[in-house]
Amino acid sequence: MAAAESALIRMREKRFYLITALLFPLAILIGFGRTYYLKTFTGAPPLSSYLVHIHGAIMTMWVLLYIAQVYLVRSKQIRLHQTLGFAGIGLAVLIVVCGFFTAIAAAKNGASTPGPPDIPRMSFLIVPMFDLVTFAVLFTAAVYYRKRAANHKRLMLVIAIGFLPPALARIPLSVIQSLGPLFFFGVPTLLMIFAIVYDRLQNGKFNKVLIYSSLFLIASYPLRLLVMGTEIWLAFANWVVGFSLV
């Protein structure tokens, strides 16, 4: 009986991660379709720099890698999953490096899809910078737990959710745009809470890594909003942008 129940839990868990692997790229496509993936058909303005092209390509590879990794685990191709994991480390480095310079260029020169009109570019720079910091911390933890599948896959789930705000903020619906951070930070927060509750119901206990990583990402949302207008941040942002050659 216990073995059957354990098998049922594993089946439900695999189904849950399969659903996330399908919904994650769908959300990215909906958010970035008009201004990036389908821009040829939507008449969106041209991308602001070559860095945006590179950044978009790298992030697309990350989304595809996430889908592939979930599929490989589901199909029990663990060795190939582990091999691709090393490629994921290299891709993560590219995400941080290219993301940094793309954010700096947008703050310095503007972007084809600018941030909220009521937030100065130097203030808004904290949003992508925090995205890079949280991604680096969470992915480092995922690499550390790579041999503990239960923790590793939950960290990768939180990372995927953490990539949603930029896509959600670009959904071209006025009701969504009017909500601002309440929507594009609120939805990922609710998704992480749902993941924690669902995980608890399925396994009969809380996964501490999932809780701590979710709280870390959730806490970063109001923190960046509180810090973005401070003199310390603005001085740092102006220094970084002035120092950069992009």
Image: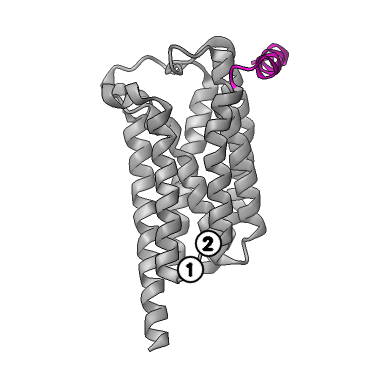
Whether pointer 1 and pointer 2 mark residues with C-beta atoms closer than 8 Å, the reply is yes
Q: Residue furthest bottom?
A: 1
87 relative position to 113: left or right: right
150 relative position to 180: left or right: right
| Residue matched to label 2 | 81
Residue at x 45%, y 12% (from the top left corner): 118
Classed neighbour count for the residue bearing mark 1: other residues with Cα under 10 Å, few (<14), some (14–19), many (≥20)? few
- Vertical position of residue 131 compared to residue 235: above or below: below
Tag 2 secondary structure: helix
Displayed quadrant of residue 75: bottom left
Q: Marks 1 and 2, how far apart in space?
A: 6 Å
- Verify whether residue 46 appears in magenta: no
**Residue span colored magenta:** 228-246
Q: Amino acid at mark 2?
A: His
Classed neighbour count for the residue bearing mark 2: other residues with Cα under 10 Å, few (<14), some (14–19), many (≥20)? some
Q: Main secondary structure of the magenta part?
A: helix
- Front residue (pair 161, 225): 225
Residue at x 37%, y 43% (from the top left corner): 25
Displayed quadrant of residue 148: bottom right
Residue at x 48%, y 15% (from the top left corner): 111
| Residue matched to label 1 | 77
Q: Position of residue 204 (x, y in %)?
A: 45, 71
